[in-house]
């Protein structure tokens, strides 16, 4: 659209300038003709006693004035077009995850050590407790020894037939409340209560008062009129536009690495030392004595039970179809 408007404006300006030049040429010709006509006029020639009539002729000259001519000069405008840049990513992609690991850091702290250094060594020694004398403890064991063994057996509980089931059914119970007769009914009847007032007293009522209202006054409002600002451009100049170029980015591939983690564990260290176990002398020795136990074992008896035999009844062909 702009490319079409600017050439039209240039044509209009050129046509106006041509018309002004043609008008100036016609006016110059007319003024020359007037000058010639004034030279050849013989109206007052030879009469010296009369007043001479002087004819003034004004000559208009066109002086060229420089003016600005806007000329449309097309120039190239570079436009940035985004495009996709593909970066190779290894598959599967390794993601490094930082795991906190407790690391013990030993800090050297100066410790004052006295000289000569005192070493405390624990030496085990025997501690003798005074005991009156070894005494014998007698435990009475009955002979023969009774062993109680629990044998499960069936317990038959008599249940009546038919079995009575007690079910609780709620029912309405009527309770008579004594009411006096005749029954007294209290009914509230509204009535007028007259409050004595001494006399009518004056009540102040706010009266209307005049309020000044500001009348509208003229305010000058500046209205902004947009106009075209033309910047003269010398010539089309080159604009350097940064073009995208491929950049090779090295993606570090994570490698597995070993992490040393210190796990506390107990170390059992055998320390040889003397352990003394007190032994009673003499000490009782208990032995198991087998005692015969009489147990009654029931023996099942075999008895004959007659099986009932029912007579077989043959159904007729008609009855078979009727049942179907």
Image (cartoon, grey):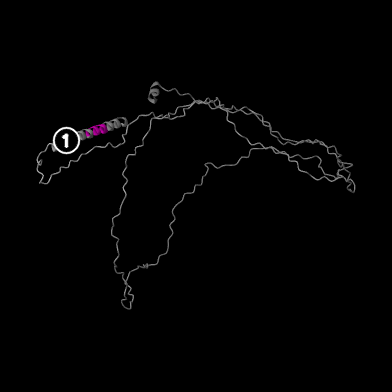
Q: Which residues are magenta?
A: 12-19
**Splitting the image into 4 quarters, where does residue 284 fall?**
top right
Q: Secondary structure at mark 1?
A: helix
Which residue, given by chain and number where applicable, does mark 1 sit on? Answer: 30
Camera-side residue of 132 and 139: 132
In which quarter of the view is residue 120 placed?
top right
Q: Is residue 233 magenta?
A: no
x and y percent of residue 312 in the render?
48, 23
Image quadrant holding the N terminus, namely top left
Label 1 crowd (10 A; few <14 / some 14-19 / many >=20) = few
User: Is 56 positioned to the left or the right of 187 in the image?
Assistant: left
**Residue 293: percent from left, percent from top:** 76, 36
Furthest-bottom residue in view?
A: 198
Asked whether 154 or 266 is in front, the reply is 266
Quadrant assignment, res 64? top left
Left/right placement of residue 156 relative to residue 122 reads left
Q: Is residue 307 left or right of residue 123?
A: left
Task: Please tell me which residue lies in front, 320 or 151.
Answer: 151
Query: Between residues 249 and 108, which one lies in front from this camera angle?
Result: 249
Check the image and report above or below for 307 versus 206. above
Q: Is residue 73 above or below residue 159?
A: above
Chief SS of the magenta region: helix
Quadrant that contains the C terminus: top left
- x, y (%) of residue 140? 82, 44
Is residue 15 a member of the stretch shown in magenta? yes
Residue farthest top in this picture: 317
Residue 17 image offset from top left, x and y in percent: 25, 33
């Amino acid at each position: 659209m702009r490319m079409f408007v600017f050439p039209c404006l240039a044509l209009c300006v050129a046509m106006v300038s041509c018309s002004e030049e043609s008008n100036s040429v016609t006016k110059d010709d007319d003024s020359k003709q007037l000058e010639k006509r004034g030279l050849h006029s013989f109206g007052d020639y030879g009469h010296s006693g009369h007043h001479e009539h002087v004819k003034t002729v004004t000559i208009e000259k066109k002086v060229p004035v420089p003016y600005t001519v806007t000329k449309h000069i097309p120039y190239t405008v570079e436009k940035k077009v985004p495009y996709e840049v593909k970066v190779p990513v290894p598959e599967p992609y390794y993601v490094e995850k930082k795991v906190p690991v407790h690391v013990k850091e030993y800090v050297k702290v100066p410790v004052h050590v006295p000289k000569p250094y005192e070493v405390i060594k624990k030496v085990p020694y025997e501690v003798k407790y005074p005991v009156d004398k070894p005494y014998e403890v007698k435990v009475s064991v009955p002979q023969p020894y009774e062993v109680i063994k629990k044998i499960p057996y069936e317990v038959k509980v008599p249940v009546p037939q038919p079995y009575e089931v007690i079910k609780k059914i709620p029912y309405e119970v009527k309770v008579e409340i004594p009411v006096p007769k005749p029954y007294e009914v209290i009914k509230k009847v509204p009535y007028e209560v007259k409050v004595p007032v001494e006399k009518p007293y004056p009540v102040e009522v706010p009266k209307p008062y005049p309020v000044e209202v500001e009348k509208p006054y003229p305010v000058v409002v500046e209205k902004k009129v947009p106009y075209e600002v033309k910047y003269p451009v010398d010539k089309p100049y080159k604009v350097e536009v940064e073009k995208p170029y491929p950049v090779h980015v090295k993606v570090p591939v994570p490698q597995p690495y070993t992490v040393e983690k210190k796990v506390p564990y107990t170390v059992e260290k055998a320390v040889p030392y003397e352990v003394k176990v007190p032994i009673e002398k003499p000490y009782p020795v208990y032995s198991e004595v087998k005692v015969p136990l009489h147990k009654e074992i029931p023996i099942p008896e075999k008895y004959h039970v007659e099986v009932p035999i029912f007579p077989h009844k043959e159904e007729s062909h008609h009855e078979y179809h009727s049942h179907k």
